[in-house]
Amino acid sequence: MTRTLPKLCLALGMAAALTAGSALAQDAATRSMVDDRGVTVQVPAKPQRIAAVSYLGVDVALAVGVMPVATTYMTAGREPDYLLGLTAGMKKIGQRAKPNLELLAEAKPDVIVAMRRYTQGNAGQFDKIAPYLAYNMELSSESFKEVAELAALFGQPQRGQELNDAFSKRLDEYAAKAPKDRHPRFQIMWAGNTPFTFHTENMAAWIVTRLGGENIAGPMVQGGRFGLEMSLEAMLEKDPEVIFVYDSGPERPHQSNPIWNRLSAVKNGRVHYVGDEWVEPNGPIARELVLREAAHFLYPDRFPAIDVKAEAATLIPASVRK
């Protein structure tokens, strides 16, 4: 009996070590993340198949050299220039406000990065497909956190920090170069009979404000939304000098309102129909391009016009541009 005990202890010890090793390996295969719902999500430590509801997940992934397998689109048939049209090679899973769960499941993702307001109501169904992270993707205060967390999820935490640092530096440089004696009144809006207009905390509006622009929509009301509906009568009262319109297609009902042609921005040819980077400006590629475009649109005598695709090519690694 006494001789058997050491052998039994050794066997039990080896079994315990193997069990512990297996548990450690299992733990190492996943990591915990808390999304903007406040939900803790177990995600793969090294996701290989990324699906995105909205372009933020695609933007961060491409910036760190990772190619997602699936994405929603903004406008059917349009591949965003700021992403170099690389979305053409990804499975389309519907419009971002109405993602198709069946198509998403067909993509077999191992992680889903989604816009919270379009997906939270179906969280349980998304969870059945793959670990699901919901981000707000709306405000300037969220961009740096989103880029850092997603870059780390995609295995590139240092690159995420580099992207945040580089943008902060460039934003300061552009703001310093902007004229201090000019503060053009501006508006950022969706097309419509009563245009939806964005408050200053919205990422694109925040960038334009940092460059010296004066947002006619002003800041958010505490606890309020990131934007508001503004009639053309209200627009005329505030009379923006520069207008940025999210270009979602050929329908532009605001142009048929006689008030439209009375606005200073319209009379002076300073209405700019902008691309998807303005709609989804929180990612590292989008926000850089919004900064460079906005600087030119506000102060064409101070900042040059840019070629969006050429600039995007300097921000997306060659490894995913092939």
Image (spheres, rainbow, N blue to C red):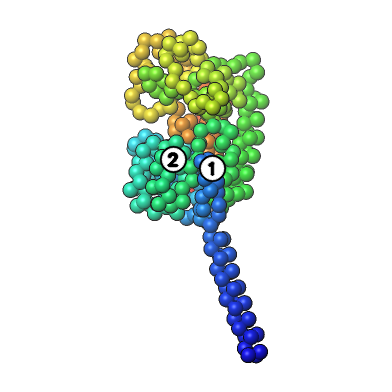
**Total marks placed:** 2
* Residue 12 vs residue 306, the one in the foreground: 12
Instruction: Give the mark nearest the N terminus, 2 or 1.
Output: 1
Asked if residue 289 can be seen in this view, the reply is no
* Residue 97 vs residue 6, the one in the foreground: 6
Question: Would you name the residue on which mark 2 appears?
Answer: 120
Residue 131 horizontal/vertical position (percent) = 46, 51
Q: Is residue 115 above or below residue 321?
A: above
Residue 3 lies in what quarter of the image? Answer: bottom right
Residue displayed at 39% across by 18% down: 194
Which element is circle 1 on? Answer: loop
Residue 185 horizontal/vertical position (percent) = 54, 16
Crowding near pointer 1: few (<14 within 10 Å), some, many (20+)? few
What amino acid is found at the position of numbered circle 1 in the picture? Gly
Residue 148 horizontal/vertical position (percent) = 59, 44
* Residue 139 vs residue 279, the one in the foreground: 139
Question: Would you name the residue on which mark 1 appears?
Answer: 38
Left/right placement of residue 254 relative to residue 317 reads: left
Left/right placement of residue 62 relative to residue 13 reads: left
Quarter containing the N terminus:
bottom right
Q: Is residue 24 above or below residue 274?
A: below
What amino acid is found at the position of numbered circle 2 in the picture? Gln
Residue 56 horizontal/vertical position (percent) = 49, 40
Residue placed furthest toward the front = 1
Residue displayed at 56% across by 61% down: 27
Which element is circle 2 on? Answer: helix
* Residue 190 vs residue 141, the one in the foreground: 141
Q: Is residue 195 above or below residue 64?
A: above
Residue displayed at 37% across by 34% down: 75
Residue displayed at 45% across by 42% down: 114
